[in-house]
Image (cartoon, rainbow, N blue to C red):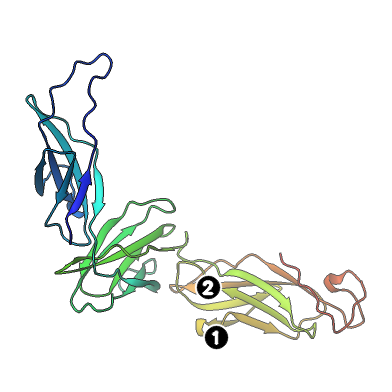
Amino acid sequence: PPPLSVVWAPPKQGLPGMALQAPVEGYRIEVVEEAGYSGDGVVMVYKSDECRADLPNLRPGVSYRVRVQAKNKSGLSERSAVGVFRTESPIQAPSRLQTTLVPGVDGGPELLVALCTWERPEGQQTMTYHVEVDEGGEGSADFYEVYVGKEAQYSLTLHPGRSYKFRVRAETAAGSSAWSVIKGFSRSISSHGCPENVAARLLDDNRTAVFTWQPPTGVVATAYQVRVDLQEGKKRRDDEGFEYLRADLPEGSHRFQVRSMVNGKWSEWCREVHLSIPSYGGGGSNGMGSQHSRDAPILPVFF
């Protein structure tokens, strides 16, 4: 890549109450790769008589931390604040980041693993991936490296109640890509989460009740059980869908709940959803006695 050009301002001279400093004779520039930055170790040192420097021989697609010191007859000044710069790279960043939550194999019922996958950049044959994870929640940027390898996937063990983000970059002999977009995901506070987005409605015949739900967030549910008016129904596999129909309910108000099987244990029942079946004789929906057409839809009552 072309040299990285860095510029800075000279030290301030003649501040009120301070003696004039000896003239600056030159500058010392420290350059450190950000990935291996510890605050001390210097990878490369350049010298310049001007307030700028072209830094050659840097790797493409790599972030560098740069600090500058001024030199005069008294010696070197303190180091400046750190400036972070990134060289250009012809390597594309990995894309299509995905996460799939799966039960752990040998960690007991509480273990849950996120399988993090991504798509390799086009036109590159041999590369190494670097994966960083942040588990500090929204607004956090405290990433740390968890994987270096050639497989386009990484398995991360999750802890209840934490939010996660991960990012990936690709590295070849020619240099490194930029970091990918950040993919976020979370695990529920309880490892035995209840189904979510539970709802109830009537079909156009005003007799068939449809109860729906979504899988719990952050866990893997393998079965569900429905309860109507505190009467438990049969167990349903997760591949049987997230919908339950009843056409035999009498007129009046009914209560619906669902729970999920996670790691061999049933969750708590979700909170109740209420739904009213209108009477055949023209009674109103919700049992209020208002008149309505048999062809008009009846709005369900939620919670």
Where's residue 263, x and y in %? Answer: 43, 72
**Circle 2 residue:** 215
Q: Which residue appears farthest toward the front when viewing the image?
A: 50
Give the total number of marks visible in the rendering.
2
Looking at the rendered structure, which numbered label has been put on residue 218?
A: none
Q: Mark 2 falls on what kind of element?
A: loop
| Nearer to the camera, 188 or 115 | 115
> What kind of residue is marked 1?
Glu
Which percent across, then down, holds residue 4?
A: 19, 53
> What residue is rendered at 90% in x and 77% in y?
292
Q: Is residue 20 visible?
A: yes
Nearer to us in this view, 47 or 194: 47
- Residue 246 appears left or right of 281: left
Residue under the image location 32 percent in, 59 percent down: 133
Q: Which quadrant of the figure has residue 23?
A: top left
Q: Which residue is mark 1?
A: 240
| Label 1–label 2 contact, CB within 8 A | no
Instruction: From this view, report whether residue 138 is shown above or below residue 187.
Output: above
Sequence-wise first label, 1 or 2: 2
| Mark 2, other Cα within 10 Å: few <14 / some 14–19 / many ≥20 | many
On the image, the x and y values in percent for residue 177 come to: 25, 65
> Quadrant location of residue 226?
bottom right
Amino acid type for the residue under numbered disc 2: Pro
Is the N terminus in the top left, top right, bottom left or bottom right quadrant? bottom left
For the C terminus, the image quarter is bottom right
Q: Residue at x 22, y 43 (%)?
A: 7
Q: Quadrant of residue 102?
A: bottom left
Rendered position, 256 above or below 250: above
